[in-house]
Amino acid sequence: MANKKTILSEEIELSEIVLKKTNQAFEIIKQEDIVCMKKTHTRGKMFKTQAAVIAGVCILAISSISAVAAIHHYWGRGMNGNIQASDEQQQVLTEKNIAKVYSEEPDSSSLAVINNGVTIEPDTVIVDERFVYMAFRISGYSAADRMEPGFDMVNVYLGDNPEDESAWVNMSGTMYDGIIPDENGTPVYEDGTAIESYEDGSIISHYTDDDGNMEYIIQASVVDVNDSFLGKTMHVEFKNLGIFLKASFISAVDGDWNFEINLSDVSSSQNIKVGKKVEGTGFTMEDINISPISVNVNYSVSAAPVENEDDLGIPEVKGVVLKDGTRIPYLTNPGRLGYTDSSKSNAYQIAGFARVVDVDEIAALIVMTSYENEKVETLEIPISK
């Protein structure tokens, strides 16, 4: 069940952080001597005096540090490759506990798993009802130039029994190669520069960061469209690290790196009634459930089109138009389309986003429809909240 607290209450979130830090300060004050660092915009100043005198200074300094920490979080390059977000969006989603940056946790070092000299640790996790985006940092190994690094096996499941059907998830994962889509869907490097190739035409990938670390990124979605990830425990298991060469895996470091990730129970989704016919089709978009990272679209169907192999002919939301007129046509990643019953009177689409969006700023959905089993026409369907 999603946490029902108001996720926009910044004062509550900040007060909890300050209270925790203040309690920690009073524990330190019990010591005979105390050192308190006051943060400034230039260089920190060190003050040392009696505990009774310094108490107020420490609380002030801790409150200031907490305020700064509460408004700046960094998701890292791997998560930016998984789902792009502006600096402001990173702050908002992290403060609301929709995203979690594990390196900011007090016990972050205890979350790392070390095997045969290779350390893997969770970096950032973002979750809503339907989708989970995860990034894991890898240190102690890097593949040779032109080699594609990866794992022999990556297993992701919910709960404690991976064989239970309720534990299954739809999952895709890859080692982050430093390449992201721009606003037009064109692949570019994360700094916005154009993709480069070797003499043989193969793409030059940037798997490691400036510190020599790599990141593995995962996107998982629910199997049952009516299920939810919120508040659940997700297991992630990595086995044997190496390279892929000519469709074969060659292990370089044997071992297992297993993690238990407790997913947030905070819902960021909005239910929006649409009730608009998708022109040229037998589909009516009844409503959507949309969050900053994914969408679930529900259709009623008056006449289901003839299926052609894997193409069901169901309209697909591909992007959004913002209230200021900005179009984001390449927003959704490949998701799932289907009918909810054998009579084909209702259909759905669930899809994750390639970048974070502000739901309150969406004015319309960009929808692609089918004509003679080919995706050819794009419509805009206004929505109001």
Image (tube, rainbow, N blue to C red):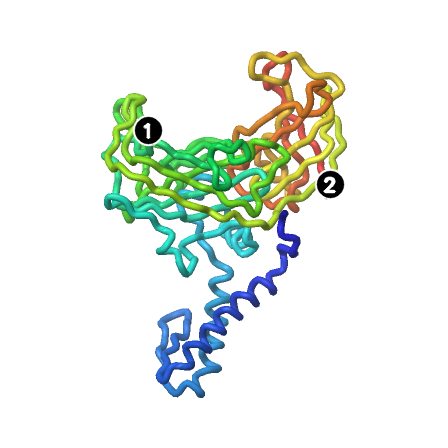
Disc 1 secondary structure class: loop
Q: Is residue 314 left or right of residue 167?
A: right
What element does badge 2 sit on?
loop
Residue toward you, 117 or 369: 117
Q: Residue at x 50, y 72 (%)?
A: 63
Asked whether 1 or 366 is in front, the reply is 1
For the point 42% across and 80% down, the residue is: 29
* Residue 265 higher or lower than 368, as above or below: below
Q: Quadrant of residue 179?
A: top left
Residue drawn at x 63%, y 40% is 290
- Counting from the top left corner in percent of width and height, residue 243 is at 28, 31
Q: Residue at x 66, y 12 (%)?
A: 306
Examine the image and state in which quarter residue 187 appears: top left
Does residue 271 show up?
yes
Mark 2–mark 1 Cα distance, whole angstroms, equals 43 Å
Number of residues whose C-alpha sits closer than 10 Å to that of mark 2, classed few (under 14), some (14–19) or many (20 or more)? few
| Quadrant including the C terminus | top right
Q: Is residue 280 visible?
A: no
On the image, the x and y values in percent for residue 139 come to: 29, 46
Up the image or down, 67 lies above or below 200; here it is: below
**Image location of residue 363, percent across then percent down:** 68, 40
Circle 1: is it few (<14), some (14-19), or many (20+) Cα within 10 Å? few
Q: Amino acid at mark 2?
A: Ser
- CB under 8 Å between discs 2 and 1: no
Q: Position of residue 354 (x, y in %)?
A: 51, 37
Amino acid on which disc 1 is placed: Ile
Specify which label sits upstream in the sequence, 2 or 1: 1
Disc marking residue 384 = 2
Q: Relative to residue 287, is residue 170 drawn left or right?
A: left
- Residue 203's disc is 1
Q: Quadrant location of residue 153?
A: top left
